[in-house]
Image: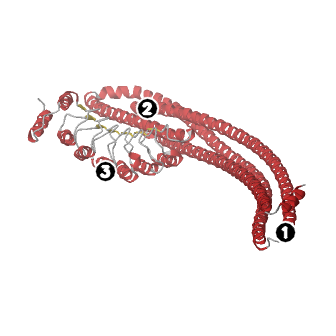
Amino acid sequence: MSNEIQDYKKQCEKQNIKPNEEVLIALNAAGETGELNLSRKTLSAWTWEVLGRIVSSSMKIKRVNLSDCLIPPRGLTAVLTSLRHDCSVDTLILRGNAIQTTNVAYLGTLLKHNGIIKRLSLEWNSIGIFIDAFSQFCEGLGTNKSLELLDLKNNQLPPESGQYLGEAIKKNTYLKTLDLRWNNLGWKGGQYLQEAMEINQTLTVIKLTGNCMSDDMIKSIEQCAQHNGSKEKIIKDCELKTDFLKRHLKRIEEERTSEVQELSRSNEMKIRQVVRESETRVSQLERLLTERASTIDMLQERLTSMETSSKQHEEKRFDLKNQLLEKDKLNEQLVEEINKQKNEWLEKLEKKNEEIQAIKSEYENKMETQFQQLKQMEIKISSQSKEMEILAADALQLKETLNGVRKKHEEALAEEQRVHKEMVTQTEKRCEEKLSQHEVELALVRTKSQNQLKLLEQEKEELERSLSDLRIQLNRERAQWQEDLAVALQQSKTREVSKLSQYEERITSLREEKASLEKQLALSHSTMSQLQQQNSSLVAELGEPQRRLSQLHEELSTEKVASQRIRVELSECRSKLEAKRQEAEKIQTRMEDLQRKMDELTTTQANREKEHVKEFDRLQNLLIQREREIQNIRADEVERAGVLYSAFNKYLGSLSPSVGVSQASLRV
């Protein structure tokens, strides 16, 4: 039984808790394999605290996998605080644990104080929501000196978090792999990362797909990381070569010392043989000197060839600079042309907006005149209703006067009856004439209103046709403008891509030349080592070639600096292209806003037309009601006249028969 299992069981006995079998199995496997795998295990906060203490004190556990465990916040804080100090764990996986604000800050303190963890996975945790805590996490990342791999996939990192990540990358000199896929860093966050990668020289792999960035920006950042990787490989190769050369020099020195000792012994033992062999050695030395002179001539020829190649490189560098200047001029011309087109389109849009507003004002004036006419119609109808009320009041007054005359003047009833009949007939004629006049006026008003409605409908149709024509023209012009923009963008893209491909081909050619130069340097080193083995005097005389080789190294370093400058200029060109794309997007948004305003105008016009239709229906209903009221008034007047006539007849029937005879004659 391992110490980890014993510690866990002791803690469970203290708390009177039954040990978890899954935890026991995982601890047993960790003692054998060195990996504590508790992925997708749901445990209490207390068990996580105990496991944190066990992991921090254990020397066997090297890798901790806590993915998809949804660790409670209190348990996760305990685990992170226990791992804050140095322990044997070098890999920590916390994928899918819903890490919150305080725990994100604890991760920063863990990275700040722990100097052993090399791999940290925080996938699917959404730590980018808590920006303040994420800034603390980035502070710890900047000061960390052991972490080599950091996984931050699917953490909802906003563009503001790119600034903190960039500062951490600038400070950190140990991180080699950073995974930021499927976040929301955007163009702003990408710029922060690009600035940081221009300073950082250790990060060799960075992944940025799914961050709402352009492909050019992602490629530039990844190329910076690849450049760091190639640079690191070159440095390692140089270190290996220097170690090999140092060992080789040590072996040569040892061989020289051994040879000197042997020569001293041989000189002491065989002085006579040395005198005899001196002549042969002199001849050998002369031969060696001739060989040395030939090798020196060969080296001088190589140096001259190297100088000519360096001059050619300088000429190529000047050509590249001139081409870059021409490219900047072309970019400026493109920007000016795009600005001119944009201004022309804006002027056209303003003119069309003014035309639309003029049409709108004319339509509103017409609608106001129609409203005034409708109000005048209502006023006329109200005046006519008042006249009808006056007539009704006059009829009532006549009725009252008739009743008074009947009571006061019974003797002169016949004459008064005749007078009253004449008055009734006259009033009936007046009422009928007025009613006929009112009917004629109402018919005229109806015909006028119907004609006006027809004219309004015709004007409405004409306005709708004009609006549809304007919309069609706007859509055509917008489509033409979009096509022109697309063509210009494609042309600029093709030009930039061709230029970039040319620059990349030149860079590759420079790299190949650099490799050939390095091979030549290696050959020169080998020849130097052979010459050193042959004679110590050759080493002293070959100081000048070594100096020239150092000069060549310096020239190679200057060429590296020039290539870096070219890369910087390429990144600036890509940023300019991004700015142009943003301007095109702004123009598209403006066109969408104008289209939205046009839609709003059409909706308001439709609403106004609906309101006019409703008001017209209401006026028609009012006219119908007034006509019904007039018909009711007519019926009431007829009934009242019949009642008066029957009353007179009854009254005359109750009088003498002479009156009846006169009544009969009157009827006839």
Q: Residue type at mark 1?
A: Glu
Question: Considering the image in quadrants, where does the N terminus appear?
Answer: top left
Q: Residue at x 14, y 36 (%)?
A: 8
Mark linked to residue 416 = 1
| Of marks 1 and 2, the one in the foreground | 1
Q: Which residue is mark 3?
A: 102
Find numbered disc 3 in the image and state the secondary structure of the residue it sits on.
helix
Asked if residue 332 lies left or right of residue 428, the reply is left
Horizontal relation, residue 76 to residue 397: left or right:
left
Q: Residues within 10 Å of mark 1 (few under 14, many from 20)?
A: some
Can residue 332 be seen here? The reply is no
Give me the C-alpha separation between circle 3 and circle 2. 67 Å
Check if mark 3's residue and mark 2's residue have beta carbons within 8 Å. no
Who's the residue at 46% across and 36% down the image? 230
Instruction: Provide residue 84's location: percent of width, then percent of height.
Output: 25, 47
For the image shown, how many numbered marks are present on the structure?
3
Residue type for callout 2: Leu
SS assignment at label 1: helix
Q: Which one is earlier in the sequence, the residue at label 1 or at label 3?
A: 3
**Residue type marked 3:** Thr
**For residue 446, above or below residue 285:** below
Name which of mark 3 and mark 2 comes first in the sequence.
3
Q: Nearer the viewer, mark 3 or mark 2?
A: 3
**Disc assigned to residue 531:** 2
The image shows residue 584 at horizontal and vertical percentages of: 66, 46
